[in-house]
Image (cartoon, rainbow, N blue to C red):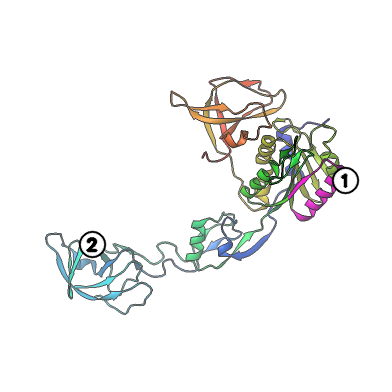
Amino acid sequence: MFRKLLTFEEAKKIILERFRPKPLGIEEISLLEGGNRVLAQDITASKNIPPFDRSTVDGYAVRAQDTFGAEENRPIMLKAHGTVRAGETSKIVVRKKEAAEIVTGAPIPEGADAVVMIEQTERKATRVRMFSAVARHENIMKTGQDIGKGETVLKSGKLLGSREIGVLAALGIAKVKVYVIPRVAVFSTGAEVVEPGRSLPAGKIYDTNAYSLSAAVLESGGKPIFLGVFPDNFVKLQKALRHALASADVVVTSGGVSVGPRDVMPKALASLGKPGTIISGIAIKPGKPTTIGLIRDKPVFSLPGHPTSALLVFHLLVRPIIQAMGGRRAEEDFEVKAVTTTKMFSAKGRKTFVMVILKRDKQNRTVAEPVLAGNSGAITTLARADGYVEIPENVQFVDANDEVAVRLLGEKQ
């Protein structure tokens, strides 16, 4: 039996007291490798962007005052004076009553202070008619208007996406310092578990957890190290755990943590060194058998074999640890208010998480409908669920038509 069932809050407190997650280190990588990495330095602009006044349209660079009074029926005639192209340094000087042809992105020539769009002009030989007036600086991006020299454009801890990579490239940065990605060893246990791709003998099931948990590690910013499936054998599990601890920063297993004769994971975990097992059972549903150890300052999360239980406990307890070790800001679950479609019962003395689907009813209310309530082993439960309703230990049930907070698991597809 479990030595002592901890409350969910007690379990989280013990984890953070015994293991304080923090970034593992910093490495410098090329900008092309920076996607989905976490920045480990503040980025301050060393130059203005753009570095010169530039045209934002194709047209004619002019002195704005020379266009005043121009209208569609009363155009103003200016003298065409050269062409300014992008990527070139122009020696053209725009003087009174002159206009220099210019393309988008080209530097504004000396003397000009505005650009008239090509659509508002008509050229004949060396003369250009202006059908619209422009104000000073119109259709011009000024030096440093996008990014000013000395400006902090990205802060440490920022997750680099396509937009951030673009900003870094615009600043001419080829390498960036990022936090090291945590390595997470993942394996399943059980005589009944077979790896996908192999034939499925009678009485066997394909390994769901190691694959779904590896994907969850990636989503959390970690690097999964997939170790496969191991039987419920003390010696073999002990060896597997030693290998996992040697090759990773965190270990996540599934199966073998309940109270059956083949559930030897807690014993194997406790045999590997101090402090060993720090949590053996949590008063939650699903996820009661969850066992957590700490071996040589590395956390080991041994999750239940039921797919929904394993993924939910990962979401609640493991994901924040991996995020912190990778320098990521903790992601808070988004909540939406919804009305229950039916009564939802809790497990006596345990915090209960009820998976729900969000829908709209005939009154256009957001409603929460339980998904396979009470069946923690259903493989599709989390795949179908939009989120979960949390029922405290001291609450027996949530009644139908009660308003509840639904914590979202991810974006609804």
| Dot placed on the residue nearer the N-terminal end, 2 or 1 | 2
Closest to the observer: 298 or 65?
A: 298
The number of callouts visible is 2
On the image, which quarter does residue 355 sit in? Answer: top right
The residue at the point 73 percent across, 30 percent down is 283
Image side of residue 380 versus residue 231, left or right: left
In the displayed structure image, the side of residue 262 where residue 178 appears, left or right: left
Residue 254 appears in view: no
Residue stretch rendered in magenta on the structure: 227-248
Q: Residues within 10 Å of mark 1 (few under 14, many from 20)?
A: few
Q: Amino acid at mark 1?
A: Val
Mark 2: secondary structure? helix
Residue 78 pos. (x, y %): 17, 71
User: Residue farthest to the left?
Assistant: 73
- As for residue 260 lying within the magenta part, the answer is no
Residue 408's spot in the image, x, y percent?
A: 56, 36
Q: Which residue is mark 2?
A: 119
Instruction: Report the residue marked by disc 1.
Output: 235
Q: Is residue 222 visible?
A: yes
Between 187 and 33, the one lying in front of the other is: 187
Q: Nearer the viewer, residue 374 or 166?
A: 374
